[in-house]
Image (tube, grey):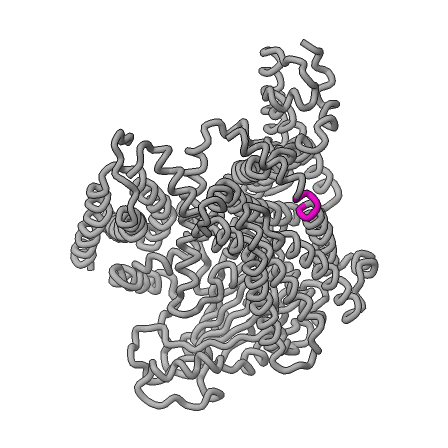
């Protein structure tokens, strides 16, 4: 992830990276947790088990997303994966939940 | 001071702590900078570096074993990890202020 | 944005560490105090300085106490918004649940009740107003609510919520700080390629920038698993707040699961609406203890819950105190309240549940292990030292160029650091002193103690701001040594005032083996000595330090 010509560290870039790491990371974790919990329930796991298991892991995922938001070269990719991916997973989870009950 | 524990359990934990400090001391002294703090400009032979590290590791394994004898494994593992942290700080601060106090632990290593 | 992975991690560590460091050092310090929260309670409430008691008789002592609990006034007022018709008077609200909680460290007993709200706007919501009480389990006598339990009632909630209740903002700030802590640890390791070499390296004789960095690295690495697990477990414990998925998007799954559980365990979720009487709970407790002993885990009652009070669906749940293992409470036995028969016994935990119990249990510390507790205390203070030396390093690295250019950055980072680090300790000690100075019968005593705490902290902040002028010439602010000296004085005062106001001096408490109070007094004295030595060193080393710093700077 080295970048020989990094963009200058302006206020706008900083705000965007910080927002991506916190808000984007949060969206990603929301989507991932709801999708994995409903998927595990669909696969037959008890809801409480699925909930507990996912909550044990999700903050490590947040940590990874958070660091990646700064380490990644392309800010656009970060927003796409974190916010975009988070949104997509949330929608998928919502659809899956509706089909389960 | 583990108040409320039977005497032999208190003693065992005390021994575990002492063994941990000794083990970390050996590991620290296998590093050149700290070796020189304790033994001056004498060089440490590569064979002795390996020996100190092996001894250090063995001591840490021993202290884990002692911890497991005293408590439930879930508790013993935490006690051991925290003992490592506390012992490392004790060794570090001794090296900062009174490095010669650690000399007896390596007195058996002949100058090389 | 960055030229390399290491560069990005260095930036993250520096700037997030700086901004959230002020919150983190507060969380770590009051978290360390919370390890001994019950002991601090004993020190603060002299009438509770007796030995820890087992859970008393429900039938003789607890039931009358429960029936005397009233809903909390503030919650009652706020509940007006949750109902469609005017609320009945506070004393007439019906209780729906009772709970009692005891620990091996607590002489007094915490009990509470949940009162149902009639005609709720949203029947699916929790719809409870709560009340709580602390009682002496030997007599049932109530400890007045304005006798503030400084440890469990003030320092402990401060560490996880900063006492910022509005919109639960305090929880979110602490949560963000915990996440940043994890990121700071990871990025810190990335920044230091030779982690093992720095494990034992502290060179106090070198210039401040170097020795501060040494200590920062050392305290960070030496307790790395501790710092990491505490931040992570804290997030897991409050995961319901941070990711409230079960109450929102996944509510259908959650509700379906609750219905399944109700069918499997026979524990009714809702009340029947038919009044009924509770039979002897003491007999139920005895049966629970018999069952635990039969499973080779004899133990004390840690937690007792009564659901659907005075209703036909009455249930009583008895949980075992987890003193001998990392898990908090467990092995619940559930009884039908109207007959005393066992409805359900909690099955052995699944793998996932056990891991969760371990992770949350290592943070919540219900276990009985004094050496481990002291280790935790030292680890927490190491975390504070790590953050504080981080501030010092940040300032030392930049103060010369800031002084030269007239920029105020490092000067205000430094002032804020004094205000936070030494300031919070000064405020804590001021609260202990106020606790001993105020009369026992003073009404609203707890309000005065809190004012002493926050007021002193505010004064410490002003002091730090006023004394920061020498930083304009890159010289150390005297606020550090002055507040350290104040810490030493206040700590000794607290010990003396304990003696004067209660007669419990160290010879007496150590002689009687009453370690909760003796331990606090001893720790205060040790802290006073360390603060005094630090104050002296900071004050007298200034000319020499300038020379060393100047020499060091010349080599940059």
User: Relative to residue A59, is residue C200 drawn left or right?
Assistant: right
Task: Determine if the magenta segment contains residue C9.
Answer: no
In the rendered image, residue C201, in percent from the top left (x then y), is placed at 59, 31
In the rendered image, residue A64, in percent from the top left (x then y), is placed at 34, 41
In the rendered image, residue C198, in percent from the top left (x then y), is placed at 54, 30
Relative to the observer, which residue lies in front, C492 or C507?
Answer: C492
Give the position of the C terminus of chain A as an image quadrant: bottom left
Q: Residue at x 74, y 28 (%)?
A: B101
Q: Residue at x 72, y 66 (%)?
A: C50
Q: Residue at x 37, y 60 (%)?
A: C241
Q: Is residue C233 visible?
A: no
Which span of residues is magenta-colored? C538-542
Q: Residue at x 73, y 16 (%)?
A: B108
Q: Is residue C16 visible?
A: yes
As drawn, which residue projects farthest toward the top?
B112
Task: Determine if the magenta segment contains residue C541.
Answer: yes
């Amino acid at each position: 992830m080295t970048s020989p010509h990094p963009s200058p560290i302006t206020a706008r870039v900083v705000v965007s990276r910080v927002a991506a790491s916190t808000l984007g990371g949060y969206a990603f974790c929301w989507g991932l947790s709801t999708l994995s919990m409903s998927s595990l329930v669909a696969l037959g796991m008890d809801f409480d088990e699925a909930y507990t298991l996912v909550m044990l892991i999700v903050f490590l995922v947040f940590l990874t997303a958070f660091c990646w938001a700064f380490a990644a070269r392309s800010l656009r990719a970060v927003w796409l994966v974190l916010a975009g991916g988070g949104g997509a997973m949330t929608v998928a989870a919502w659809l899956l939940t509706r089909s389960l009950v | 001071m583990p108040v409320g524990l039977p005497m032999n359990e208190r003693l065992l934990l005390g021994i575990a702590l002492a063994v941990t400090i000794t083990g970390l001391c050996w590991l620290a002294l296998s590093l050149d900078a700290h070796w020189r703090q304790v033994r001056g400009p004498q060089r440490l032979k590569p064979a002795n570096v390996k020996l100190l590290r092996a001894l250090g590791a063995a001591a840490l394994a021993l202290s884990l074993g002692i911890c497991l004898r005293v408590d439930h494994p879930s508790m013993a593992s935490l006690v051991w990890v925290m003992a490592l942290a506390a012992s490392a700080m004790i060794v570090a601060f001794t090296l900062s202020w009174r490095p010669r106090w650690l000399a007896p632990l390596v007195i058996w290593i002949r100058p090389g | 944005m960055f030229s390399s992975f290491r560069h990005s991690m260095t930036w993250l560590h520096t700037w997030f560490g700086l901004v959230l460091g002020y919150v983190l050092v507060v969380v770590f310090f009051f978290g360390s105090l919370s390890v001994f929260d019950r002991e601090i309670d004993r020190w603060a409430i002299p009438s509770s300085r007796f030995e820890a008691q087992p859970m008393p008789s429900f039938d003789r002592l607890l039931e009358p106490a429960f029936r005397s609990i009233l809903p909390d006034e503030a919650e009652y007022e706020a509940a007006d918004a949750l109902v469609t018709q005017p609320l009945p008077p506070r004393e007439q609200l019906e209780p729906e649940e009772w709970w009692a909680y005891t620990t091996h460290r607590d002489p007094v007993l915490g009990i509470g009740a949940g009162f149902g709200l009639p005609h709720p706007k949203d029947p699916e919501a929790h719809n409870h107003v709560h009340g709580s009480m602390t009682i002496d389990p030997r007599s049932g006598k109530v400890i007045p609510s304005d006798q503030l339990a400084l440890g469990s009632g003030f320092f402990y909630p401060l560490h996880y919520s900063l006492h910022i209740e509005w919109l639960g903002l305090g929880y979110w700030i602490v949560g963000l700080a915990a996440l940043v802590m994890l990121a700071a640890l990871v990025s810190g390791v990335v920044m230091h390629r030779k982690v093992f070499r720095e494990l034992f390296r502290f060179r106090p004789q070198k210039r401040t920038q170097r020795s501060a960095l040494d200590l920062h690295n050392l305290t960070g690495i030496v307790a790395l698993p501790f710092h990491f697990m505490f931040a992570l477990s804290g997030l897991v414990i409050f995961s319901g707040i941070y990711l409230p998925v079960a109450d929102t998007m996944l509510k259908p799954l959650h509700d379906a699961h609750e219905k399944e559980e109700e069918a499997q365990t026979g524990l009714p979720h809702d009340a029947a609406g038919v009044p009924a009487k509770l039979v002897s709970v003491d007999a139920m407790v005895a049966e629970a203890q018999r069952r635990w002993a039969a499973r080779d885990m004899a133990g004390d009652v840690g937690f007792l819950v009564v659901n659907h009070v005075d209703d036909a669906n009455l249930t009583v749940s008895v949980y075992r105190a987890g003193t001998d293992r990392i898990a908090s409470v467990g092995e619940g036995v559930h009884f039908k309240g109207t007959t005393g028969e066992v409805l359900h016994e909690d099955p052995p935990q699944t793998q996932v549940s056990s891991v969760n119990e371990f992770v949350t249990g290592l943070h919540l510390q219900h276990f009985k292990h004094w050496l481990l507790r002291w280790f935790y205390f030292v680890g927490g203070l190491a975390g504070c030292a790590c953050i504080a030396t981080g501030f010092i390093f940040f300032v030392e690295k930049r103060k010369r160029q800031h002084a030269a250019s007239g920029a105020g950055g490092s000067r205000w980072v430094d002032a804020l650091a004094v205000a936070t680090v030494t300031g919070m300790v000064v405020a804590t000690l001021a609260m202990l002193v106020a606790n001993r100075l105020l009369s026992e019968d003073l009404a609203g005593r707890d309000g005065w103690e809190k004012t002493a705490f926050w007021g002193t902290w505010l004064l410490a902040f002003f002091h730090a701001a006023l004394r920061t002028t020498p930083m304009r010439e890159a010289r150390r602010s005297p606020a550090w040594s002055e507040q350290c000296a104040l810490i030493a004085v206040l700590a000794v005062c607290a010990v003396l005032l304990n003696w004067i106001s209660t007669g419990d001096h160290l010879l007496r408490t150590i002689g009687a083996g009453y370690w909760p109070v003796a331990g606090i007094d001893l720790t205060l004295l040790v802290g006073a000595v360390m603060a005094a030595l630090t104050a002296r060193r900071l004050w007298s080393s200034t000319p020499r330090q300038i020379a060393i710093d100047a020499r060091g700077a010349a080599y940059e």
